[in-house]
Image (cartoon, helix red, strand yellow):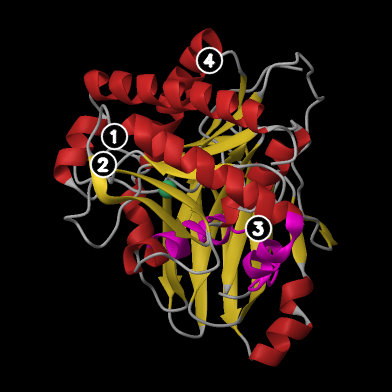
Amino acid sequence: MQAQSQIHVSAARTAGDAKQARFVLDLSRPLPFTVFLLQKPYRLVMDLPAVSFEMAQGIAQVERGLVSNFRFGVINESRSRVVLDLKGPARIAKAFGLPSVDGNPARAVVELEAVSEQAFVGQALQDVLHIGPEGERAEKSRLVSSVPTPRARQKSGRPVVVLDPGHGGIDTGAVSANGVQESVLVLRFAKLLKKHLEAKAGVDVVLTRESDKFVSLGGRVAFAQSRNADLFISIHADSVRERYVRGATVYTLSDRASDQVSAGLAQRENRSDLLAGMQIEDEDDVVADILISLTRRETANHSALYSRTLVGALEQSVHMSKTPARSAGFRVLKAPDIPSVLLELGFLSNKQDQVELTSKLWQDKAIRSIVTSVQRFFAKRGSLGADQ
Ligand SMILES: [Zn+2]
């Protein structure tokens, strides 16, 4: 068998009205794909093999009848995804592929039809359509959710720090006015930080993602648990509506946000899985629940200790926000047994921050401070004993 080159997606478009919609992807050659629907809010998910998307992200801002907008990106090494936000309940009327004809690109087509809420829950939501490479409907099946596979535990005796570069793949995170993507910025930063932590802080470091792929919030927590992490640091550089807000900020988990900006930030951050077309279970009270448990309280103490240590070290070298230690209900911080913080390096919505965060000088200073904070944390924690 001949090695096949990667499939390119060159364009996407929607047509239709409030009753029906047609969504078309232009492809360099036909491919197999899977489509299914999600609710709360209504979405259509289209799963493709690994492809390269060669269209601008801005294209996702279209609004056409049933479809309010769509996103696309990488889910993992072998899978890409397109997610359409729908204005109401719909069913998949047709899904098929078309070969390339007369110089026109090959296509993947999905047709949607508005249905009642009852019909949506009763039938439409159950259907998963697998379309073969020749465009035929290959099979129909039930939805199977994907769970990240934990890698084998490594044992070296050194503390394990899990760094969690936020977002990735279909979820780009914040994008600055001049096009810097949060997902790219924080991945680079985390890789650099790993190198320095391993060389200078006497810890082993693993990353929740090493490439531009999507990892669910629950998947990040599960990964840290599978690696027996002693410390979890989620790294972000988000946007907030309040453009004057700038500076590094360290967040810990709380069922009640410390302020308005934090509440809004956690709410947007927790939408990551939803943006990527993940099935979200109702877990409204999960943060409150886990705060009650004893383990959770001990872990919260350690998270607070690390947050203070990190703020103290960062203050020596980089610009901090007005209130650098804050709390909110971030889902990614909910491992009940791992001290966890979310570090906003700064805010891409702020011009000065955007300039600093992308400078090598700033990154070097921030990394030195984080290395110091990790050394101090494990030194203090060691002296407190195991059951503090
Ligand atoms: Zn973020």
The residue carrying pointer 4 sits among few (fewer than 14), some (14 to 19) or many (20 or more) residues within 10 Å by Cα, namely: some
> Circle 3 — which element?
strand
User: Position of 181 compared to 243: left or right?
Assistant: right
Helix, strand or loop under label 1: loop
Q: Secondary structure at mark 4?
A: loop
CA separation in Å, label 2 and label 1 = 6 Å
Q: Position of residue 322 (x, y in %)?
A: 24, 51
Q: Which residue position holds label 3?
A: 96
Q: Amino acid at mark 1?
A: Glu
Please give the residue where the numbered disc 4 appears in the rendered image.
201
Specify the segment rendered in magenta. 265-294
The residue that label 2 is drawn on is: 320
Q: CA distance from mark 1 to mark 3?
A: 57 Å
127 up-or-down from 73: above or below: below
* Amino acid on which the number 3 mark rests in the picture: Phe
Front one among 89 and 357: 357
Q: Which label's residue is closer to the chain start, 1 or 4?
A: 4
Residue at (38%, 73%) from the top-left corner? Answer: 64
As shown in the figure, which amino acid type bears the numbered disc 2? Met
